[in-house]
Amino acid sequence: MLWRKHGADVSYWSVIGGEVGNYAFVARFDRIEAYGRSLASLGADPAFAEFQAKRLKAGQSEWVRSNLSVQVDV
């Protein structure tokens, strides 16, 4: 998996409440700096560009939204 290759802790979820039928791809990082490094590394990886091109050409998925969250200590 490309995101793992570039440092992410990855999980994939089936949504069962709210937007039923959608899936959520989660790439988790311990620090925001690690997220930035991962994005830079992915952007420079030809395999990621090839994956994105194939995904778009296939037309079998749609990017609904992107969220960036940070944990808040309580």
Image: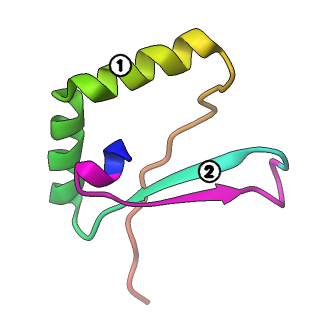
Name the N-terminal-most of marks 1 and 2: 2
Query: What label does residue 24 carry, if any?
Result: 2
In the image, residue 57 sits, relative to residue 30, either above or below, namely: above
Farthest-out residue, top: 57
Element type where label 2 sits in the image: strand
**Is 42 colored magenta in this rendering?**
no
How far from the left and from the top, in percent, is residue 6?
23, 49
Q: Residue at x 76, y 56 (%)?
A: 15
In the image, residue 5 sits, relative to residue 30, either above or below, namely: above
The amino acid pointed to by label 1 is Glu
Alpha carbons under labels 1 and 2: distance apart: 21 Å
Element type where label 1 sits in the image: helix
Name the residue beneath numbered marker 1: 50
Q: Which callout, 1 or 2, points to the residue nearer the camera?
A: 1
Q: How was this image coloured?
A: rainbow
- Depth check: give the residue in front, 36 or 51: 51
Report the magenta residues as a range: 4-19
